[in-house]
Image (cartoon, helix red, strand yellow):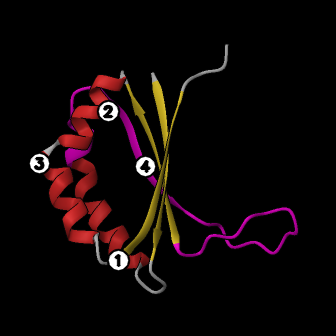
Amino acid sequence: MLTVLAEICVRPGRRTAVMQAIEKLTPVVLQEEGCGSYQALVDHQAQVPWKQNSPDSIFMVEHWESLRHLEQHQQAEHMEHHRANIKDDVVDVKIFVLEPAK
């Protein structure tokens, strides 16, 4: 099982709009073959010195059975539509594909 951590950096003031698009997309993604989980998280506002602050980011935590399943997800028509729908609100996307440490 692969874990994907993706940081979606959005334009200031547009996080709610992008979150709404992700919420509409999530049930479709969860139906995809090989998808174990698909969850959006946002920054917890806490005033502690050791914490990074990312108020304009959305973090996706995803689990996929294999790289093939993840690639199929990335190429799915609904994902292409989703990316086109939010492209004006997104500044950058950082994707990490992780596996358990041996």
Q: Position of residue 37 (x, y in %)?
A: 39, 37
Which kind of residue does numbered mark 1 sit on? Asp
Residue at figure coordinates x 20%, y 69% from the top left:
85
Residue at figure coordinates x 62%, y 70% from the top left:
54
Which kind of residue does numbered mark 4 sit on? Gln
Q: Is 23 on the left-hand or right-hand side of 61?
A: left
The part of the chain drawn in magenta is 28-56
Q: Mark 3 = which residue?
A: 77
Q: Mark 2 = which residue?
A: 70
Q: Nearer the viewer, mark 4 or mark 3?
A: 3
Q: Main secondary structure of the magenta part?
A: loop
Q: Is 26 on the left-hand or right-hand side of 61?
A: left
Residue at figure coordinates x 85%, y 69% from the top left:
48
Dot 1: few (<14), some (14–19), or many (≥20) neighbours within 10 Å? Answer: some
Which kind of residue does numbered mark 2 sit on? Leu
Q: Is 44 on the left-hand or right-hand side of 97?
A: right
Residue 39 badge: 4
